[in-house]
Image: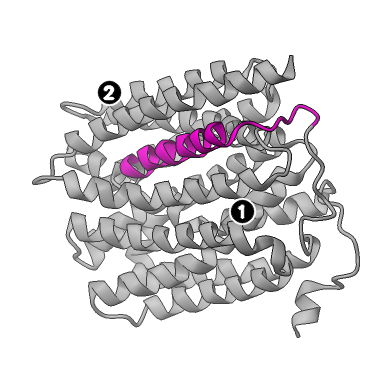
């Protein structure tokens, strides 16, 4: 049965072929599927399961910690295991976890099951990002991955309020289980390992250990900032007086702005320089968060979330693509993906710890500060990379 899913391990796969790119992008969507619609998922926990805002944030963090710890483990073991086999196992963990979540009572037990589900998700996230990092054009392909993730997110945000009304949280969890299971169709088109596919980028350099650490730290801080804001973005909207459907519509619209940002990254590549591109994107994120301070009516909220998603999804591919050129062995991509997911796990819990009586201003300020720090610490590695290329 396993052979029918994974195909012939001895048959070589061209990771730059259309079918392999479609497969890896599809798995790249399934891996973080709940995180992409996390604001709506957190809102569902508060509205339907009557969790507190902090409690829902900690549940979201639990799943992200499952993803994060798995991506960290994959940095040490991914070169020793059969990628197709572990993807099948991970997919079944996700299916089982989503179905089991329907029958779990109690917030702690629910968080534990979501953590286990996150372990499966982490494998898909780690390997999909790693495989794209091995392709001949990672700037473009990371951009297309982010773009299609956002298409999924746009549909998800638009559908989830109606889905909650029609089938409740249980029906939504069944959808995530079936969506996860569909990954099994595509696994056979992915490589068994990365050994035969690794080809250093012609512009790749070997930075010092200290600068590589700084680069990975920048990824971590950037995604802590992202996780801090993203988990509570739905509740920030409703706290300003907007209805749940208005907030869902705003987040849906913002996904299309995110698609535009990711498409811009895919088309532009590195032609404008990564420092300028990252500075533009991160500044856009910071400005969008300033809009959310103070009184937030529907127009301000729409403007802020659309700018936030555009800026985030434009800078995200540039950040990941930059990392791929800092190390000629290709291992740094795995570390960066682990740092990304750990940051997204830390973010919601960190945000939950500073919320007070429905006041989200501290969450927003925390996001602003962390975005600025991430920009400051990614500059030295990029500058050193440019110097070594001269």
Q: Earlier in the sequence, mark 1 or mark 2?
A: 1
Q: Residue at x 58, y 63 (%)?
A: 123
Establish if 233 lies above or below 4.
Answer: above
Quadrant of the image occupied by residue 263: top right
- Span of residues in magenta: 202-229
Q: Main secondary structure of the magenta part?
A: helix
Establish if 73 lies above or below 141.
Answer: below
Quadrant of the image occupied by residue 136: top right
Q: Which mark is residue 189?
A: none
Mark 2 surroundings: few (<14), some (14-19) or many (≥20) residues within 10 A:
some
Q: Is residue 28 left or right of residue 389?
A: left
Callout 1: helix, strand or loop? helix
* Residue located beneath label 1 in the image: 28
Q: Nearer the viewer, residue 54 or 236?
A: 54
Q: Position of residue 299 (x, y in %)?
A: 29, 26
Q: Residue at x 44, y 72 (%)?
A: 116
Most extreme residue toward the right is 11
Distance between mark 1 and mark 2 Cα atoms? 31 Å
* Residue located beneath label 2 in the image: 290
Q: Report whether residue 72 is seen.
A: yes
Q: Position of residue 178 (x, y in %)?
A: 56, 71
Q: Position of residue 271 (x, y in %)?
A: 70, 17
Q: Report whether residue 302 is seen.
A: no
């Amino acid at each position: 049965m396993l052979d029918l899913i994974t195909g012939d391990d001895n048959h070589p796969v061209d990771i730059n072929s259309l079918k392999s790119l479609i497969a890896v992008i599809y798995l790249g969507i399934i891996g973080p599927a709940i995180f992409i619609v996390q604001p709506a998922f957190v809102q569902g926990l508060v509205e339907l399961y009557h969790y507190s805002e902090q409690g829902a944030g900690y549940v979201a963090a639990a799943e992200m910690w499952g993803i994060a710890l798995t991506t960290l483990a994959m940095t040490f073991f991914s070169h020793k295991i059969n990628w197709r086999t572990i993807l099948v196992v991970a997919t079944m963990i996700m299916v089982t976890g989503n179905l089991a979540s329907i029958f779990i009572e109690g917030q702690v037990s629910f968080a534990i099951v979501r953590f286990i589900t996150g372990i499966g998700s982490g494998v898909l996230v780690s390997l999909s990002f790693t495989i794209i990092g091995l392709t001949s054009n990672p700037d473009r392909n990371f951009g297309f991955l982010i773009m299609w993730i956002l298409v999924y997110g746009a549909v998800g945000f638009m559908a989830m309020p109606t889905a909650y009304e029609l089938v409740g949280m249980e029906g939504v969890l069944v959808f995530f289980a079936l969506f996860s299971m569909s990954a099994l169709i595509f696994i056979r088109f992915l490589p068994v390992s990365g050994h035969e596919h690794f080809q250093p980028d012609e512009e790749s350099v070997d930075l010092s250990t200290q600068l590589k650490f700084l680069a990975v730290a920048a990824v971590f801080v950037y995604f802590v900032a992202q996780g801090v804001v993203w988990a509570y973005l739905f509740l920030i909207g409703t706290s300003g007086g907007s209805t749940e459907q208005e907030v869902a519509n705003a987040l849906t619209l913002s996904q299309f702005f995110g698609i535009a940002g990711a498409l811009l990254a895919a088309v532009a590549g590195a032609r404008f320089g990564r420092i300028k591109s990252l500075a533009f994107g991160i500044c856009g994120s910071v400005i969008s968060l300033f809009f959310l301070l103070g009184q937030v009516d529907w127009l301000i909220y729409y403007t802020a979330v659309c700018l936030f998603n555009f800026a985030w999804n434009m800078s995200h591919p540039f950040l990941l693509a930059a990392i791929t050129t800092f190390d000629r062995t290709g291992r740094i991509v795995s570390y960066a993906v682990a740092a990304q997911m750990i940051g997204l796990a830390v973010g919601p819990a960190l945000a939950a710890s500073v919320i007070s009586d429905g006041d989200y201003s501290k969450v927003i300020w925390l996001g602003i500060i962390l975005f600025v720090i991430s920009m400051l610490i990614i500059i030295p590695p990029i500058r050193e990379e440019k110097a070594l290329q001269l």
